[in-house]
Image: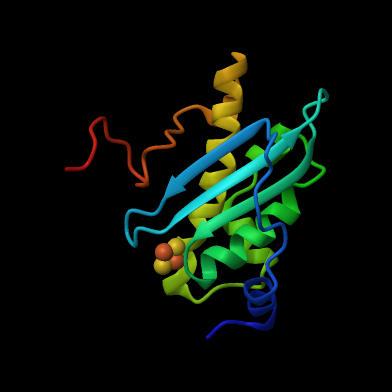
Amino acid sequence: MYNEKVMDHFMNPRNVGEIEDAEAIGEVGNPRCGDIMRMYLKIDNNDVITDVKFKTYGCGSAIATSSMATEMIKGKTVKEALKLTNMAVVEALDGLPPAKVHCSVLAERAVKAAIYNYAKARNLMYEELEGFDPNDGHDHHHDHEEE
Ligand code: FES
């Protein structure tokens, strides 16, 4: 069901762990399955992401996409990292089974959530984050918590 690249990132995920003095930490959950993901970023004075680590309680697809996502944003600027879409990660993995594509959203949102917290703490604005709500696990917009 999974291709070789996905299996490789699932069996040997890159950048697993935490960063104690991270500038940015984000945690998101997938409301469909209850899986959670935490992302840690080291960001230098030039807005460059110098290190990335992640931890997840998630399925194989969530692990593989996070692993790939961390590889894709390392060395990039914050703005570049905000442009990373889950579909770009899926493509870099040569595809996921259709039923598992939604799992890849967790990685994209974890990166965004980390940068969201980073921006908030420093009073920074990134237009790419407009409308992003780290607590909203759904695709549509809603103003209230689910019951
Ligand atoms: Fe939960 Fe894949 S089943 S993220």
Q: Position of residue 71 (x, y in %)?
A: 75, 55
Q: Position of residue 12 (x, y in %)?
A: 70, 73
Q: Image quadrant of ligand 1? A: bottom left
Q: Is residue 124 visible?
A: no
Figure quadrant of residue 28? top left
| Side of 73 relative to 45 (left or right) | left
Q: Residue at the front extreme?
A: 20
Q: Position of residue 85 (x, y in %)?
A: 59, 50
Vertical arrangement, residue 138 with respect to residue 34, above or below:
above
| Side of 104 relative to 99 (left or right) | right
Q: Residue at the left extreme?
A: 147
Quadrant of the rendering where the C terminus is positioned: top left
Nearer to me, 4 or 26 = 26
Residue at 77% over, 47% down? 74
Q: Position of residue 129 (x, y in %)?
A: 54, 30
Q: State how the image is colored.
A: rainbow
**Numbered label tally:** 0
Nearer to me, 78 or 122 = 122
Residue at 66% over, 61% down? 67
Vertical arrangement, residue 104 with respect to residue 11, above or below:
above
Vertical arrangement, residue 64 with respect to residue 107, above or below:
below
Q: Is residue 61 visible?
A: yes
Residue at 54% over, 45% down? 110
Residue at 54% over, 48% down? 38
Vertical arrangement, residue 73 with respect to residue 77, above or below:
below
Q: Residue at the top extreme?
A: 123
Figure quadrant of residue 95? bottom right
